[in-house]
């Protein structure tokens, strides 16, 4: 693990994989290196179906689990996690990243699909289906991977993802009572995240966010921290630094990157960058770190081979 990775647990943002365009992204990790072998977190939900032939160590928050073939790993937004393998060959897995707004759209009356990721569930963060039950998920994965890319296929993909979520809700949430308050909190965070994503290049004030969602500043700050574990200000800064790193990797100058991601004060940009990355942007570029933390994939369906 590099100096930078050990100093700061990075955000692997949905902005890196265009998940916002369709609401989800899938990656079938079959071989090649594991691009996210370090501890990280996402601003979207993740489900991982473990298909490997060897047991794998999964690190989640401050705990460790051994996962075996047929296990389903559930990961909420902003939770620190990693799969401790350098290569994927013996540790194959099918990952589904889901935008919170899509999860809410898929929910129905008295069935909040966000409860799949409820930490109070006895099936969280590892759901181990009973013998034979994993086959229904495996069937959906195989059907999904066989789909040709073409006109109308994203709709079929969305339907299969919806069916996976429906199965998981049925299997994992039987003991959890419906909680409308929880649904509202997730929806509020989704609104805030979406607005921040759309206005990241501009100055964003908490009062502005408050007016957008029609709740007080104190309330949105409290709910956001409860759901994500981070303050709104911390989240905005981290998103901007993630975007700046992408721009630097694409050839932008440091000043251009700072301005494009909403920092009108270079000194503030430098301090924020150094605090998060353990070094300034110039040193970051000189040491060739840009791009190494970007997840694989750029759309709805990615297969690593």
Image: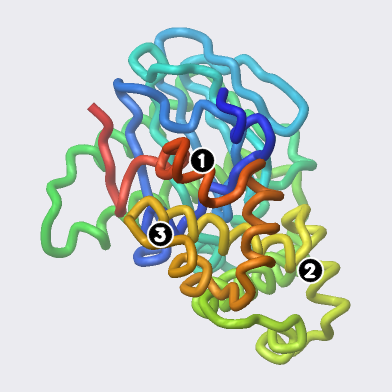
Other-residue count near label 3 (Cα within 10 Å), few / some / many at <14 / 14–19 / ≥20: many
Q: Quadrant of residue 87?
A: top left
Residue at screen point 61% across, 75% down: 191
Observer able to see residue 129: no
Q: Position of residue 49 (x, y in %)?
A: 46, 30
Determine the secondary structure under disc 1.
strand
Is residue 170 placed above or below 18 in the rendered structure?
above
- Say whether marks 3 and 2 touch (CB < 8 Å): no
Residue at screen point 45% across, 45% down: 285
Q: Nearer the viewer, mark 3 or mark 1?
A: 3
Is residue 125 placed above or below 1 in the rendered structure?
below
Residue at screen point 40% across, 59% down: 247
Determine the secondary structure under disc 2.
helix
The residue nearer to you, when weighing 175 against 246, is 246
Classify the position of the N terminus by image quarter: top right
Q: Quadrant of residue 182?
A: bottom right
Residue annotated with mark 1: 47
The residue nearer to you, when weighing 205 against 3, is 3
Determine the secondary structure under disc 3.
helix
Res. 5 mark: none
Residue annotated with mark 2: 181
Residue annotated with mark 3: 247
Q: CA distance from mark 3 to mark 1?
A: 29 Å
Observer able to see residue 39: yes
Q: Position of residue 83 (x, y in %)?
A: 54, 24
């Amino acid at each position: 693990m590099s100096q930078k990775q050990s100093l700061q647990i990075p955000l692997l943002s949905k902005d890196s994989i265009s998940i916002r365009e369709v609401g989800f992204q899938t990656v079938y990790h079959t071989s090649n290196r594991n691009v996210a072998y370090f501890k990280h977190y996402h601003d979207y939900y993740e489900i991982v179906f473990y298909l490997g032939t060897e047991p794998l160590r999964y690190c989640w928050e401050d705990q460790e689990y051994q996962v075996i073939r047929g296990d389903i790993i559930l990961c909420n937004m902003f939770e620190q996690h990693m799969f401790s393998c350098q290569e994927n060959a013996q540790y194959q897995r099918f990952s589904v990243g889901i935008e919170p707004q899509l999860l809410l759209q898929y929910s129905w009356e008295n069935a909040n699909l966000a409860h799949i990721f409820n930490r109070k569930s006895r099936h969280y963060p590892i759901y181990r289906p009973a013998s034979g039950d994993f086959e229904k998920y495996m069937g959906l994965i195989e059907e999904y991977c066989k789909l040709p890319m073409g006109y109308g296929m994203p709709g079929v993909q969305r339907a299969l993802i919806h069916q996976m979520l429906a199965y998981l809700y049925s299997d994992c949430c039987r003991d959890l009572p419906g909680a409308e308050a929880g649904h509202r909190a997730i929806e509020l965070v989704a609104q805030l995240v979406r607005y921040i994503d759309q206005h990241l290049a501009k100055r964003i004030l908490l009062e502005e966010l408050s007016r957008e969602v029609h709740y007080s500043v104190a309330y949105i700050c409290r709910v956001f921290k409860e759901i994500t574990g981070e303050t709104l200000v911390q989240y905005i800064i981290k998103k901007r630094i993630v975007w700046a790193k992408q721009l630097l990797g694409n050839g932008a100058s440091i000043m251009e990157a700072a301005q494009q991601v909403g920092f009108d004060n270079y000194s503030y940009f430098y301090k924020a960058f150094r605090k998060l990355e353990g070094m300034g942007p110039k040193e970051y570029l000189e040491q060739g770190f840009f791009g190494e933390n970007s997840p694989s994939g750029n759309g709805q369906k990615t297969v690593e081979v």
